[in-house]
Amino acid sequence: SKYFFLDEFVDPQTYFTENDNGLSKIDNKLFAIADLLREKLGKPLRINNWWHYYTQLEAKGWTIDKIIKTILNSDYSKWSGYRSPACKIGAKLSAHRKGKAIDPKGDEDELFEIVKENAKEFYKLGLRRLEDPNITKGWLHADTMELNTTPNTIRVVDLKKVTQIIKT
């Protein structure tokens, strides 16, 4: 990715225990979607932010197991991309658990408008669903999951229903 590192898409346990640091757990389309969102926003954007905490704990000489456990129990963002079986938040069948979703942090309305204004570009990259910004305070859920999708549209959903269809 042009603007992001892999740790922003996976949790620390996945990063440090998978042979490829969890790269194979992530739908590659998400990297391009995140990059386009960052470019259109025109300023830094983050997904997960646990890496800086990791470097602080590593500098203290902590073991990797203790670091992982500490980060997993911290308030640092670690589940805003792939959600491993260790994750206790979100739906069991969510796009996050399949490595097909990200929750970039920022003003949810601003991020939503960027996607809406550039829907054709985001759709071409594989974006298929957004969560309604009325239920995502401080982030925007974006995913590539093909579930009840219609060609050339991005579905906007809340926890129960489709709230909007963005045509590309």
Image (tube, rainbow, N blue to C red):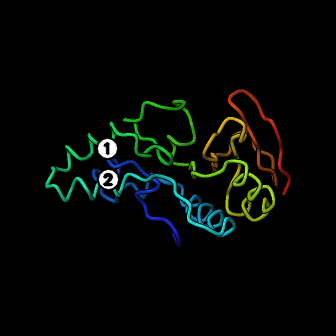
Q: CA distance from mark 1 to mark 2?
A: 8 Å
| Residue 115 coordinates in the image, percent (x, y) | 74, 57
Q: Residue at x 59, y 61 (%)?
A: 34
Dividing the picture into quarters, in which one does residue 65 lie?
top left
Q: Which residue, as the protein is rendered here, is positioned at the far top?
A: 160
Q: Which residue, as the protein is rendered here, is positioned at the far bottom?
A: 2
Dividing the picture into quarters, in which one does residue 163 lie?
top right
Nearest to N terminus: mark 1 or mark 2: 2
Q: Which residue, as the protein is rendered here, is positioned at the far right?
A: 167
Element marked by disc 2: helix
Q: Residue at x 72, y 54 (%)?
A: 110
Q: Give the vertical position of 164 relative to 30 (above or below).
A: above
In the visual, does 72 lie left or right of 149? Answer: left
| Residue 74 coordinates in the image, percent (x, y) | 35, 39
Number of numbered tags placed on the structure image: 2
Q: Residue at x 39, y 54 (%)?
A: 22
Q: Residue at x 34, y 58 (%)?
A: 52
Q: Which mark is residue 39?
A: none
CB atoms of marks 1 and 2 within 8 Å: yes
According to the picture, the residue beneath numbered tag 2 turns out to be: 53
**How dense is the environment of label 2, judged by Cα within 10 Å: few (below 14), some, or many (20 and up)?**
some
**How dense is the environment of label 1, judged by Cα within 10 Å: few (below 14), some, or many (20 and up)?**
many
- What is the three-letter code of the residue carrying label 1? Ile
Q: Give the vertical position of 93 relative to 126 (above or below).
A: above
According to the picture, the residue beneath numbered tag 1 turns out to be: 71
Q: Give the vertical position of 145 relative to 90 (above or below).
A: below
| Residue 155 coordinates in the image, percent (x, y) | 76, 44
Element marked by disc 1: helix
| Residue 79 coordinates in the image, percent (x, y) | 46, 43
- What is the three-letter code of the residue carrying label 2? Tyr
